[in-house]
Amino acid sequence: MQAVVPMDHRYLAENDGSEFASGRGSGREKLPNPDEREHDRNPIPYMNMVYAPIERRLDMAVWRSLFASSARQARQFVIHGNVKVNGQKMPYPGYLLNPGDMFQVDMDRVMFATGAPKQIHQVRAGRTKAKKALAQQQRKEAEDKAQSGAQELASSGWQDVELVRAQRKEDFGNLLTQVEDSFNDRRNRPGAKRKIELRALRKDILGAMRKVNQKTAKTLDDELNNLLARMSITSAAQKAQAKAETEELEAQPKEPTKEQVQALREVMAREAENPIDNSKPYATPWTPRPYMSAFAFIPRYLEVNHNICSAVYLRHPVARPRLAEVPSPFPTEIHQLAFNWYLRRR
């Protein structure tokens, strides 16, 4: 149990230790005064250092650095491979740190541990975003595959009718998905005239999909080109309508005041530093939790940088006069009893 014992510099300067060799009655000995015992006024609580080896554990160091909301959560982060020691992944929560070791925790895990939890609408928005991203990726992969298949057929110089029909059916399905996305576009809501065009286009696409096996390859190619041309015309009309609405809004003479401009700049700065991202496991924009864990402080033997979620284990904890660096809610007497119990049963 390591402790720091302060030495009296005046006594060390005046004496060289020879006074301890003097016999009784020499006059150099100084009888102790029970009223002037400094160790009673500044006791060293070294009994509180019984559990100091626990502070060397990696999961406890992560918790002491305020990278997790509890020791169990810190243990979970270590086991899941979200903590590195000296640049290497360390999945063992009982790893004992040595002085000078640097450990780093994944930033998203720290934000999740110390940030406010997501609301139900944020969870749903994140799931919807993930589903859209997955559907877009699958659609892109299907288009790339179809394009590569068409290039292979063109380079071979012949066409398999069944393969062409299957490819055209997939192309019709992708086109139908684009039409549905145009219907459900909340930013650029289609007008009444465009809705009629989209409904007619959807009806023709469904009819073409039902009769794919009854037509030749050339007929399917012509029909697909026709539907693509109609889709591009409707998209161009939508863009023109959106552009006209934007120009109409920009034409309105509105000059913001200086206070409004300053408020807008502050909002944009906060948005850039703390953006809204529903794909994160924590609530965005990030806000801290309304409470903190017990013993929420950084001990002296840790050097923590919360900007990069890293910390350095400087040294082992020690006991100083009237101070023990191992946090505990129990007094010294309880630790003394625990240490005596350990000595008898070790």
Image (spheres, grey):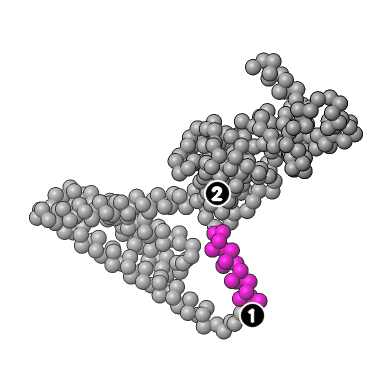
Which numbered dot is residue 60?
none
Residue 271 is a magenta residue:
yes
Q: Main secondary structure of the magenta part?
A: helix
Q: Residue at x 16, y 53 (%)?
A: 152
Q: Look at the image and tell me in which quarter the N terminus lies.
A: top right
On the rendered structure, is 221 left or right of 35? Answer: left
Q: Is residue 202 or residue 324 the one in the foreground?
A: 324
- Residue 162 placed where, x, y %? 17, 47
Report whether 223 appears left or right of 307.
left
The amino acid marked with disc number 2 is Cys
Q: Quadrant of residue 63?
A: top right
User: Residue shown at 19%/55% (left/top)?
Assistant: 150
**Depicted 268 relative to depicted 82: above or below:** below
Q: Viewer-proximal residue, 314 or 158?
A: 314
Is 237 contained in the magenta span?
Answer: no
Query: At which x and y percent is residue 201?
Result: 34, 62
- Location of residue 305 in the rendering, given as x and y in whole percent from the top left corner: 58, 51
- Residue furthest toward the left? 157
Work out how far the residue at label 2 is from the one at label 1, CA to CA, in angstroms.
41 Å
**Label disc, if present, on residue 309 of the rendered structure:** 2
Query: Amino acid type of disc 1?
Result: Thr
* Numbered mark located on residue 257 in the image: 1
Q: Residues within 10 Å of mark 1 (few under 14, many from 20)?
A: few
- Left/right placement of residue 220 relative to residue 44 reads left
Magenta region, residue range? 258-275
